[in-house]
């Protein structure tokens, strides 16, 4: 059985290795391999630990991190009820085994039970990635619109991301 736990700073090298694997897959993540640096990992791990949420899935066979999910607040008072830049990655060898779904469900359940000050969780997904859009929809995310030709790929083709949001049913407006 896989273990899901909050990430800690010392997980950064393992998260870096995971992201590098995922970035090698076409459409696996928005960043390309050379954009996956230790500085990038440190930045989002730190932001997520300090003012958001970050969870990892660990394989008990070898104690390796095989999946990660995070989102954080951006620091502006007007947006203090939002977790944004949500990203989830699952190691290629472990995709299709419901690890991502399990991790995502735990992430959302944690927000519902421990983050009553958070109303929204936001993410972007490529418009042509229909399976992922359906996956997010089944988790309760709604489509809030398109950003026409916002993504420019390395081959110079343009893609349109869909902005999606999930709403915390346990949000406390007084917080």
Image (cartoon, helix red, strand yellow):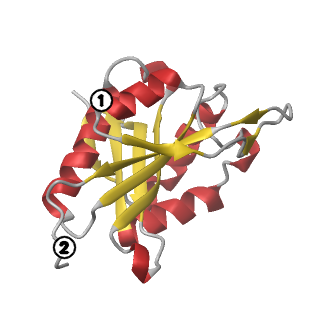
Give the camera-side residue of 160 and 14.
160
Residue at image mark 1:
138
Quarter of the image for residue 48 reads bottom left
In the image, is residue 76 above or below residue 91?
A: below
In the image, what residue occupies the spot 56% across and 56% down? Answer: 41
- Camera sees residue 62: no
Q: Position of residue 149 (x, y in %)?
A: 72, 41
On screen, residue 95 versus residue 40, left or right, reads left
Q: Residue furthest bottom?
A: 77
Image-based side of 35 in relation to 119, left or right: right
Q: Position of residue 15 (x, y in %)?
A: 50, 46
Which badge, 1 or 2, is on the more N-terminal residue? 1
Residue on which disc 2 sits: 173
Helix, strand or loop status at disc 2: loop
State which quarter of the image contains the N terminus. Answer: top left
Toward which corner of the image does residue 156 lie, by quadrant?
Answer: top right
- Quarter of the image where the C terminus is located: bottom left
Work out whether residue 18 can be spotted: yes
Quarter of the view holding residue 20: top right
Q: Is residue 44 left or right of residue 25?
A: left
In this view, the residue in front, 157 or 58, is 157
In the picture shown, does residue 86 fall above or below 151?
A: below
Crowdedness near tag 2: few (<14), some (14–19) or many (≥20) residues, C-alpha within 10 Å: few
Residue 174 location, x and y as percent? 16, 79
Q: Nearer the viewer, residue 68 or 73?
A: 73
Q: Residue furthest right?
A: 156
Q: CA distance from mark 1 to mark 2?
A: 26 Å
Few, some or many residues within 10 Å of mark 1 (<14, 14–19, 20+): few
């Amino acid at each position: 059985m896989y273990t899901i736990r909050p990430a800690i700073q010392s997980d950064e090298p393992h998260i870096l290795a995971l992201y590098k694997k995922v970035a090698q897959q076409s459409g696996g993540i928005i960043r390309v391999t050379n954009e996956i640096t230790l500085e990038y990992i440190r930045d989002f791990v730190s932001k997520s630990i300090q003012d958001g949420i970050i969870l990892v899935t660990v394989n008990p066979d070898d104690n390796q991190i095989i999946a990660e999910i995070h989102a954080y607040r951006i620091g502006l008072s007007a947006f203090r009820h939002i977790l944004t830049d949500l990203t989830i990655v699952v190691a290629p060898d472990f995709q299709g085994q419901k690890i991502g779904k399990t991790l995502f469900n735990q992430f959302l359940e944690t927000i519902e039970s421990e983050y009553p000050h958070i109303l929204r969780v936001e993410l972007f997904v490529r418009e042509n990635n229909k399976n992922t859009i359906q996956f997010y929809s089944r988790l309760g995310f709604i489509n809030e619109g398109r950003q026409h030709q916002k993504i420019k790929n390395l081959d110079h083709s343009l893609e349109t991301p869909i902005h999606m949001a999930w709403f915390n049913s346990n949000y406390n407006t007084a917080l």
